[in-house]
Amino acid sequence: MNTAQHAFAAEQYGARARDYVTSAVHSAGGDLDQIEDAVRGRHDAHVLDLGCGGGHVSYRAAPHVARVVACDVTAAMLDAVAATAAERGLSNIAVRQAPAERLPFADGAFDIVLCRFTAHHWQNMEAGLREARRVLKPSCPALLIDTIAPADRVLDTHLQAVELLRDASHVRNYSAAELIAALSRSGFAVEGITVRKLRMEFPIWTARTRTPALHVDAIRSLQITAPAIVREHFAIDEDGSFDIEAATIVVRAV
């Protein structure tokens, strides 16, 4: 396992922790409503928020369940989540630092696993999914939410390029088909998928990751010179704002 790369990702996001707590894209959305509906009434459940980032999944789940463990590789993110949880009176949120591929929890420790906007940062996506399955009790549910790549290779290449320029710790956005296949291989039964469009406002999108100006210019150059199929698919605006798809995949441990 590439622990140096985990450290690099943690370093990249450490300085940005508060930005992700306050991010409008991360703090709202139909996917969070779907998560809240999934945990509502599960008063005795122990929940893992895997790759918690700014903690928005934890904040939504905590009022409905017994306990939430917010797990992330970035210590500063966890500090921000712990502070925000305390501010909101959510005393049943605990934080734990660990990479997704090596979780410090016993087999079957959780009744629900929730994972949002993080799998594209994992060094080994399937290893992370296998760990998620290991710590989830048999027959229990999980929700994996992530931005997804188009199946078309031209569109996929454009997305991976701009994501890497924006954030040097980016690993890969997977297609919905790739995620579903990986989940199946990792011991999950897929029960449903919902795909939603997200509008990325370019100035906010790059400011949140503190993208260097040179890279911002490179992204804009790629967008401006992209073929029509790319500009149309992503609905690229004159200021660089564009659409991306996110999938919410509901699964159950088998």
Image (tube, rainbow, N blue to C red):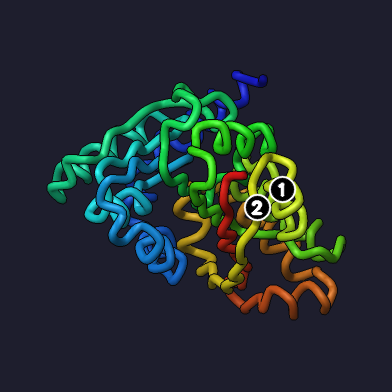
Residue 126 visible in the displayed image: yes
Q: Nearer the viewer, residue 51 or 133?
A: 133
Residue at position x 76%, y 51% from top? 181
Residue at position x 67%, y 78% from top? 235
Q: Nearer the viewer, residue 104 or 14?
A: 104
User: How many C-alpha atoms fall within 10 Å of the one at disc 2: few (<14), some, or many (≥20)?
Assistant: some
- Tell how many labels: 2
Q: Is residue 128 left or right of residue 157?
A: left
SS for dot 2:
strand
Residue at position x 66%, y 41% from top? 187
Circle 2/circle 1 CB separation < 8 Å:
yes
Please provide percent x and percent y for residue 117: 53, 52
Quadrant of the image for the C terminus? top right
Mark 2–mark 1 Cα distance, whole angstroms, equals: 6 Å
Quadrant of the image for the N terminus? top right
Please provide percent x and percent y for residue 148: 67, 59
Q: Mark 1 is on which residue type?
A: Ser
Q: Is residue 161 left or right of residue 54?
A: right
Task: Give residue 151's mark.
Answer: none
Q: Is residue 188 left or right of residue 64?
A: right
**Image: 85 above or below 205:** above
According to the image, label 2 marks what residue? 189
Location of residue 228 (image quadrant) = bottom right
User: How many C-alpha atoms fall within 10 Å of the one at disc 1: few (<14), some, or many (≥20)?
Assistant: some
According to the image, label 1 marks what residue? 184
Q: Mark 2 is on which residue type?
A: Ala
Please provide percent x and percent y for residue 170: 63, 43
SS for dot 1:
helix
Q: Earlier in the sequence, mark 2 or mark 1?
A: 1
Q: Nearer the viewer, residue 144 or 137?
A: 137
